Image (spheres, grey):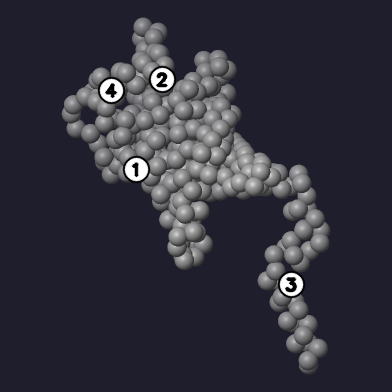
Amino acid sequence: MSKAVDTAKSSAAVLTKPAAESSPTAASFLHHPYTRALLPFVNGGLAGMIATTCIQPIDMVKVRLQLAGEGVKTGPRPGPLTITREILAQGKVMDLYTGLSAGLLRQAVYTTARLGFFDTFMTGLKTRAETQGNTIGFRERAAAGLSAGGLAACVGNPADLALIRMQSDGLRPPEARANYRSVVDALSRIAKSEGVYALWAGASPTVARAMALNFGQLAFFSEAKTQLKQRTEWGMTRQTLTASAIAGFFASFFSLPFDFVKTRLQKQGKGADGTLPYKGMADCFRKVAREEGLMRFYRGFGTYYVRIAPHA
């Protein structure tokens, strides 16, 4: 009987241990240099894809808010609830998930790269600081966030473009809609009809947005967690959620104007005269400020914050 109890306790102890502790093979795999280098990228991509699945309807509403009343300075402005009702009235609940395949691809590419690069840069900075007897500060975190965001945005722009095209397609007249079946269909048709380089339309504001977002999100998240750990007795979960809320605010504040311009540039198509409404990022900023007012860039801030905070 005693032997059976001891056996049961031993089995329970093994089950409650992490795989890396209970299995030498798992420990060897997880601590392999290549695995440790890849884990930040894998973790970042999976985290981003899960967050996108949860907040895709909010992203859909955010994009429609940014495109509503284009070129008009005065007049009624629909709110998030109005936009949601309009989408539901035109189809069904799943219409809020339009472009999900593009959103998932975007996260698989962009978030995987940006969080992986950020972790890699931070590891390098920490190692260098330790050899010099120093500690990294906010400046180093900000530099890592800006660099990671810019590099990842270049790679993820085609998926980002496909996402905007799929989400804005419902605003067109029925006879003019592309009715993309998936992100692969969208990318292939855009490349075929507009050229491969068209997949990088809006790349400038996309990179600027990513750098601003990462500066606010990753740098402030890391700094907030450090400060909360030093100044409070809170548990890890409470520290993480509070740091996420703080980082989400700053990320939204810094990146929303660029996100707005990115959406406008990636959605635009040639008019009857063969010209585009906006010539580029600077032209879009100038025309929106003149025709719709400066505060237009921050319209829907609450919706955007709710979309950004879960990713933080």
Residue at numbered disc 4: 289
Instruction: Specify the amino acid type for callout 2.
Output: Met
Name of the residue lying farthest toward the bottom: 1
**Label whose residue precedes the other's in the sequence (1 or 2):** 2
Return the x and y of residue 105 as percentages of the image width and height. 57, 37
- Using the image as rendered, state which of residue 239 and residue 305 is in the foreground: 239
Q: Is residue 58 visible?
A: no
* Residues tagged 1 and 2 counted as in contact (Cβ below 8 A): no
40 horizontally vs 98: left or right: right
Label 3 Cα crowd, 10 Å radius (few <14 / some 14-19 / many 20+): some
If the image is split into quadrants, where does the N terminus sit?
bottom right
Label 1 Cα crowd, 10 Å radius (few <14 / some 14-19 / many 20+): some
Between the C-alphas of marks 1 and 4, the distance is 21 Å
When the figure is inspected, residue 13 is found, relative to residue 263, above or below; the finding is: below
- Using the image as rendered, state which of residue 165 and residue 200 is in the foreground: 200
- Using the image as rendered, state which of residue 198 and residue 273 is in the foreground: 198
Instruction: Specify the amino acid type for callout 4.
Output: Ala
Residue at 71% x, 77% y is: 12
Instruction: Specify the amino acid type for callout 1.
Output: Thr
Instruction: Specify the amino acid type for callout 3.
Output: Val
Return the x and y of residue 86 as percentages of the image width and height. 29, 39
Between the C-alphas of marks 1 and 2, the distance is 23 Å
SS for dot 4? helix
SS for dot 2? helix
* Residues tagged 4 and 3 counted as in contact (Cβ below 8 A): no
Q: Mark number for residue 14?
A: 3
Q: Mark number for residue 303?
A: 1
